[in-house]
Image (cartoon, grey):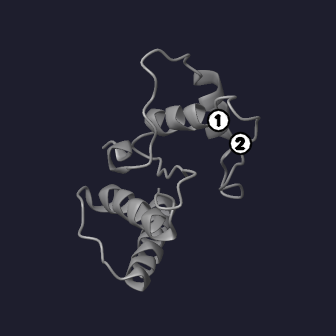
Amino acid sequence: MNLTEYSLTLPALPEYIVPRTNWITWIHDRFTPERQAIVIQAPDGAGKTTLLAQFAHHYSAHCFSFFVKPDQYVSTPKLFFQELCMQMAVALRGEEVRLPDNFDDLKKLFADSYHDLELRYKKM
């Protein structure tokens, strides 16, 4: 399963790209049950977005992604929940689902899906 196929905000990688396997592995190894979020900070143009897109592709079966854009019409809370709910549905059920139009229902679906993922991966 390739969850990047369900991320509308995932930036396209350039045709020629420097592989950053060491950085991707380093980021992956920083995640622990106690550390579930990591901040990547660097100057504009340093390659943060490209690095994280590479990370999402490298771990495409296990990585949910949403890339914030400067456009207020693309980076909305509703789109955030839609993208992540679809990615979680594919990870949990192996197929796309019809997402609710109502924002409150979407937030509930997000919370339920997150809970289901927690239960599934705690058993592993």
Q: Which numbered disc covers residue 114?
A: none
Residue at mark 2: 40
Mark 2–mark 1 CB contact (< 8 Å): yes
- Measured Cα–Cα span from mark 2 to mark 1: 7 Å
Q: What type is the residue that disc 2 sits on?
A: Ile
**In the rendered view of the protein, which quadrant contains the N terminus?**
top left
Residue at mark 1: 48
Q: What type is the residue that disc 1 sits on?
A: Lys
In the rendering, at what x and y percent does residue 43 appear?
A: 76, 34
In the rendering, at what x and y percent does residue 23 appear?
A: 65, 28
Q: Residues within 10 Å of mark 2 (few under 14, many from 20)?
A: few
- Left or right of residue 81: residue 33: right
Secondary-structure class at tag 2: loop
- Which residue is at a point 51% across and 31% down the rendered structure image? 54
- Which residue is at a point 47% across and 59% down the rendered structure image? 121
In the image, residue 54 above or below residue 71: above
In the image, residue 4 above or below residue 116: above
- Left or right of residue 85: residue 111: right
Locate residue 60: give its quadrant.
Answer: top left
Locate residue 29: give its quadrant.
Answer: top right
Q: How many marks?
A: 2
In the rendering, at what x and y percent does residue 109 appear?
A: 39, 76
Label 2 or label 1, whichever comes before in sequence order: 2
Q: Residues within 10 Å of mark 1 (few under 14, many from 20)?
A: some
- Left or right of residue 27: residue 42: right
In the image, residue 101 above or below residue 56: below
Along the viewing direction, whichever of 115 and 48 lies nearer the viewer? 48
Secondary-structure class at tag 1: helix
- Which residue is at a point 66% across and 47% down the rendered structure image? 31
Along the viewing direction, whichever of 45 and 123 lies nearer the viewer? 45
